[in-house]
Each structure stands twice: as structure tokens, then as C-alpha cells.
Amino acid sequence: MTTGPLNELASQIAFVRNQSGFTAPNPSNVERKLLMAVGEICEAQEELRDGREIDKIYFSEGGKPEGFPVEIVDAIMRLMDVAYANSIDLDATFKLKLAFNKSRPLKHGRLY
């Protein structure tokens, strides 16, 4: 795995996960871990349904950060943890996919 900012962040996410006593994503539980990321996206959508602004972070009693940005980050962190725990090189894969996307036609040949 290459060194880079995404892989470094994923390493930190895995460290916190381990320190918190949670199980690492692996082939036997990856479906559940992916659904947890979907759950975070649903929570982000609920923040908007509740009328909160898309860019606002607020704090619940006890100081827990809440809001659309926080839920999006939660989803990203869960996905990064899945990748890192399964030896997926995020930095290299992002570069590969971005290079491919730059070569695609306008709207990939679709209406939207």
C-alpha cells in the first residue's frame, strides 16, 4: 500500500476503531459494514428533512457533533475503514479512477 493522505487517514480511523473495541471489516461482515455506511447517509438526509442547513454543525447535549457534514464524514470514515481493513490502497485507487473519469465523454453519454 502506498503512503498518502487517504491511506494515512484510513490508518487513523482503523486505530480509533480498534481502540473502541469494534470489529474490523472483513469478508464475513463487510455487507453489514457497508449497510452502516448507508445508514450514515440516511442520517445525513434526515438532517436536511429536519430543516437543518447543509453546511451547519451543531452539538447535542454532551458535546457530540451533529449535522449533515458530520453524517457525511461518518459515512466516508466507514467506507475508508472497509477499504483499509481489506488492504485496498485508497490513494492509488482514487488516482486511477480520477484519471479514468477525466477521459469519459460529457455526462458519460447520458442525459444526467
Image: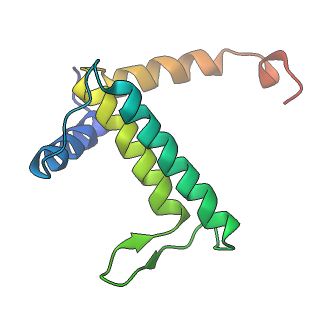
**Residue shown at the point (41%, 79%) measured from the top left:** 59
Vertical arrangement, residue 43 with respect to residue 98, above or below: below
Task: Locate residue 55 relative to residue 58 in the image: left or right.
Answer: right
At x 29%, y 39%, the residue is 5
Q: Find residue 34 and report its image quarter.
A: top left
Location of the C terminus (image quadrant): top right
Q: Quadrant of residue 61?
A: bottom left
Residue 58 lies left or right of residue 51; in this view the side is left
Number of numbered labels in the structure image: 0
> Is residue 12 or residue 2 the one in the foreground?
12
- Residue 22: horizontal and vertical position, in percent? 18, 44
Q: Is residue 46 above or below residue 27?
A: below
Task: Quarter of the image for the N terminus: give it.
Answer: top left
- Point out residue 90 in the picture as x, y percentages from the top left corner: 35, 27
Q: Residue at x 30, y 82 (%)?
A: 62
At which x and y percent is residue 21?
Answer: 12, 47
- The colouring scheme, among rainbow, by chain, secondary structure or one colour, is rainbow
* Image position of 67 (left or right of 105): left
Rendered position, 112 above or below 74: above
Q: Name the foreground residue: 76 vs 22.
A: 22
Q: Residue furthest bottom?
A: 61
Q: Residue at x 34, y 26 (%)?
A: 30
| Front residue of this view, candidates 92 and 79 | 79
